[in-house]
Amino acid sequence: MEKTRAEAFALLGEYTKSPQLIKHALAVEASMRHYAGLRGGDAEYWGITGLLHDMDYEIYQSLDDHPYKGVEILRREGYPEDMLQAILGHGNHTGVARTTDMAKTLFAVDELSGLVVAVALVRPDRLDGLEAKSVRKKMKDKAFARGVNREDIVQGAEELGVPLDEHIQNVITALQKAKDDLDL
């Protein structure tokens, strides 16, 4: 792939101004990089996929438009088709099959990265010492982080073939490595 992480981050910044959405992109990037290491993927490539997965969301929040409009932009910018297919498949509403390990991972870490960040934000030690059981407890509380789709988290772990607690711990570990970028 010819595109660099710096180019991808600059493109993200053209379309995403919200600090929260940028932090979500960074969290998903970190989770993707970590999983690439676990599953034999290219960490840079997987990371860029995670970084750009919601690059259009601030402008195109309708499920009729997101992530389709972003993929159109990325295609014009010359991003590879397998990356675009992974981005298209990161939401069940698109009907795009997740056929690669990278695509399955993006779906699996998207909502979970958001939940782990939400849990960290209500803890005095943030990500330090955070365990999967604490995330599971908050996951059961439907009033906590209401926008996080719990069914997608469970489905994502199943599609990866990773037990849910292990999957949660993998994402916690990934985010701990990126905690300075995430202000956690």
Image (tube, helix red, strand yellow):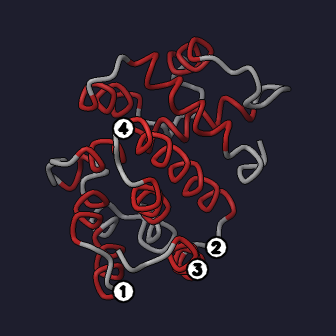
Compute the Cα span from label 3 to label 2: 11 Å
Name the amino acid type tagged 1: Glu
Q: Residues within 10 Å of mark 1 (few under 14, many from 20)?
A: few
Name the residue at 60% across, 27% down.
144
Mark 2, residue position = 17
Which of pointers 2 and 1 indicates the residue nearer the eye? Answer: 1
- Position of 86 with respect to 144 (left or right) is left
Mark 4, residue position = 108
Compute the Cα span from label 2 to label 4: 25 Å
Compute the Cα span from label 2 to label 1: 19 Å
Instruction: Name the disc covering residue 10, or none.
Output: 3
Mark 1, residue position = 77
- Given contact means CB atoms under 8 Å apart, are the residues at marks 2 and 1 in contact? no
Which of pointers 3 and 2 indicates the residue nearer the eye? Answer: 3
Compute the Cα span from label 3 to label 4: 25 Å
Name the amino acid type tagged 3: Ala
Name the residue at 38% across, 80% down.
2
Compute the Cα span from label 1 to label 4: 26 Å
Q: Nearer the viewer, residue 41 or 114?
A: 41
- Name the element at disc 4: helix
Q: With respect to residue 116, does 103 lie above or below?
A: below
Compute the Cα span from label 3 to label 1: 12 Å
Q: With respect to residue 12, does 122 lie above or below?
A: above
Q: With respect to residue 4, does 162 lie above or below?
A: above
